[in-house]
Amino acid sequence: MTSFHCHQLLLSSCKNLSSLTQIHVRIITPGYNFNIPIATHLINLYSSFKRSNFSRTLFDLTPNPPLVLWNSMIRAYKEQIRAERDVVVWNAMISGVAQCGEAVKAVELFKKMQIVCVISPSSVTLLNLL
């Protein structure tokens, strides 16, 4: 199996940001030939872990990025915007419920936001719970 295929398999096995960064460091070694499919995979993975800034850094380091990398970056930013919009909607719901005196219901929404919907709270979310 070539190193390209090994790298693709290793990247596909990443379950968290820590494992992704460890594998990324290992595949970018002296003598590594830049590879568009690997770069695309890395950009997509970083954005899936909500690290579009890492995706952008990798994109910026790519000489003459082809269309596939542009598409990956657009997708990364789209996901980031959607996540930011989602937290705003949750903040509005939590705030409204809390202002109606339903503190327990507000905390239940907060838990659902994190556990069921896997949306990270913002500082505004935490203020709404006070």
Image (tube, rainbow, N blue to C red):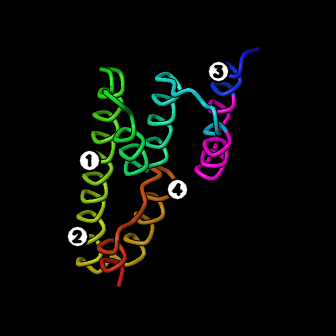
Relative height, residue 55 to residue 4 (above, below): below
Residue at image point 31% right, 27% down: 64
Most frequent secondary structure within the magenta stretch: helix
The quadrant in which residue 77 appears is top left
- Residue 89: image x %, image y %? 25, 56
Q: Which residue is mark 4?
A: 115
What amino acid is at disc 4? Ile
SS assignment at label 2: helix
Q: Nearer the viewer, mark 4 or mark 1?
A: 1
Dot 2, how many residues are within 10 Å of its Cα: few (below 14), some (14-19), or many (20+)?
some
Disc 3 to disc 4, how far (Cα)?
Answer: 36 Å
What's drawn in magenta, residue-wise? 10-26
Relative height, residue 39 to residue 24 (above, below): above
Disc 3 to disc 2, how far (Cα)?
Answer: 52 Å
Task: Find out whether residue 79 is within the magenta segment.
Answer: no
Q: Which residue is mark 1?
A: 81
Q: Is residue 73 left or right of residue 31?
A: left
Furthest-right residue in this view: 1
Dot 1, how many residues are within 10 Å of its Cα: few (below 14), some (14-19), or many (20+)?
few
First in sequence: mark 3 vs mark 2:
3
Disc 1 to disc 2, how far (Cα)?
Answer: 23 Å
SS assignment at label 4: helix
Residue at image point 32% right, 47% down: 80
- Residue 128: image x %, image y %? 30, 77
Contact? badges 1 and 2 (CB < 8 Å): no
Q: Which residue is mark 3?
A: 4
